[in-house]
Amino acid sequence: MLSRINLQKSVVSAARQGLKTTRSYSLAATYFPNEPKSPELITDSIPGPKSLASNEELGEVFDNRAAYFVSDYTNSVGNYLSDADGNRLLDVYAQISSIALGYNNPALKETAKSDEMATALINRPALACFPSTDYGKVLKEGILAAAPPGLSKVWTALSGSCANETAFKAAFMYQAAKRRGSMDFTAEELTSVMQNKTPGASDAVILSFEKGFHGRLFGSLSTTRSKAIHKMDIPAFPWPVAPFPKLKYPLDEFKHENLAEEDRCLAELEEIFHSYPKEIAAIIVEPVQSEGGDNHASARYFQGLRDLTMKYEILMIVDEVQTGVAATGKFWAHEHWNLTTPPDMVTFSKKFQAAGFYFRNPDLQPHQPFRQFNTWCGDPSKALIARTIYQEISKNNLVEATAQVGDYLYKGLSEILAKYPTKVKNLRGENFGTFIAWDFIGASERQEFLDSCRAHGINMGGCGDFAVRLRPTLVFEKNHADIFLALTEDIMKKLYT
Ligand SMILES: Cc1ncc(COP(=O)(O)O)c(C=O)c1O
């Protein structure tokens, strides 16, 4: 008999191979019998008086200036986020793409109430030194059961930025070890590294792409290229940047231009690889540049990137912090590319709640212990949550369900937005699950739309300079899509007719 885990894995594999198993019932209704049927608006405006008062109090001790409103998570259900005033908004932003199974999901509640969760929470281990007896099993049943094809190992971390930075460290140590061969560290390396100088401290680099976003810690921020304000005043590594394709929409109308644009970007990248004066240890790339504006490129382009990295023996890190965990119609967005060789590392966080990077080559583990190391090195409580998220996604075939609702949303949006060609453009994310975005003609038009969304009971986010993006949960279903589409149509009519 197949074990529970194997059985669940086979369901995901079936979905990955395109086997359609459309569910005939609403999972959201099963999970959340009390989910609102549509947005519930109580106050005249959002933030309402309770939100404002609560935020003011918070502001005395915590920088709250980015807060849209204060949330009440006990009153939030499924796809509806409650604010402090009791307004319940249809949430297509989901904590910046981080809520997989809806608010107060019963399966996650059960995990949260379990004895193993209590043990994990109150006895948080320094994982590298004192790993718990069950950490390997929990990883194998959850985070590793979900591993991208070809990658069988994981290093766990604390956030998306941390996942990327640990991947960078793995890349630098891997390349240095390859250069050194069987030699040990030299005396000069050991002395110079204590002065932050070469040859002990590496001057190798990580290459990233224009408009990419990889986090805000020091190393990750050096690879982030989305907005100047994020980087201002922070010391940065002098690392190289390459152009990322700027595609034109609709894609079938601009086939030739887009092919030429991707070829131009690949050629410029190859020129950098060829002539860069320092060692490029790795590149880092998002399958869809999310914070930078939801910029897509074709599978052919990404295969081109893979080919170049292999030709020049540069590691390829795919940052799936935002795209990962079933939102794009595949469990991992890079599965859309059908690469001939898997990426060297794939980083994750957000919807998995846990963070880290996957890899295959054991040499991406440094040869000595304590070099890839922190106190926590991840968090067993988050690994338990990730396991439940993975198991629920598998059991309920949420990869396929998200692909289907995404197709429905895309079609609906294309009909609505086509009526406003002078206001919106570049609808993108077709056949890419619910990972859908479009542009407004300007930043003020975009802001006006987002404000109207909130006033109509939708919580939605922007990205880049002019885009709005959809990042709903994986239990966002057709009925939620219908509400979203009807409200979007209404908002567009009110704004522009
Ligand atoms: C693609 C990508 N990488 C990395 C990060 C950084 O993750 P975190 O904010 O958890 O550090 C983000 C966050 O939005 C992201 O979208």
Image (cartoon, rainbow, N blue to C red):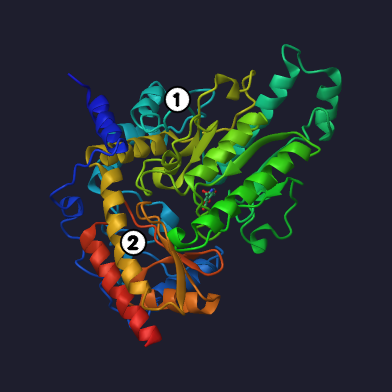
Q: Secondary structure at mark 1?
A: loop
Which circle, 1 or 2, is nearer the viewer?
Answer: 2
Q: Residue drawn 41% across and 39% down?
A: 382
Q: Is residue 249 above or below residue 144?
A: below
> On the rendered structure, is 166 left or right of 173?
left
Query: Percent x, y for residue 359?
Result: 51, 28
> Of callouts 1 and 2, which one flags the residue occurring earlier in the amino acid sequence?
1
Q: Quadrant of residue 201?
A: top right
Count the numbered circles shown. 2
| Visible residue check, residue 76 | no
Q: Which mark is residue 218?
A: none
- The front one of 12 and 297 is 297
Q: Secondary structure at mark 2?
A: helix
Q: Is residue 351 above or below residue 86?
A: above
- The front one of 44 and 340 is 340
Q: Please, which residue is most extreme toward the left here?
A: 24
Give the residue type at disc 2: Tyr
Give the residue type at disc 1: Ser
> On the rendered structure, is 372 left or right of 120?
right
Reading the image, the residue beneath label 2 is 410
Query: Percent x, y for residue 152?
Result: 45, 25
- The front one of 46 and 443 is 443
Alpha-carbon neighbours of circle 2 within 10 Å: few (<14), some, or many (≥20)?
many
Q: Please, which residue is most extreme toward the top here?
A: 182
Query: Percent x, y for residue 423?
Result: 46, 78
Work out which quarter of the rendered image holds the N terminus and state it: top left
Work out which quarter of the rendered image holds the C terminus and state it: bottom left
> On the rendered structure, is 43 left or right of 191?
left
Q: Residue drawn 30% across and 72% down?
A: 87
Q: Which mark is residue 152?
A: 1
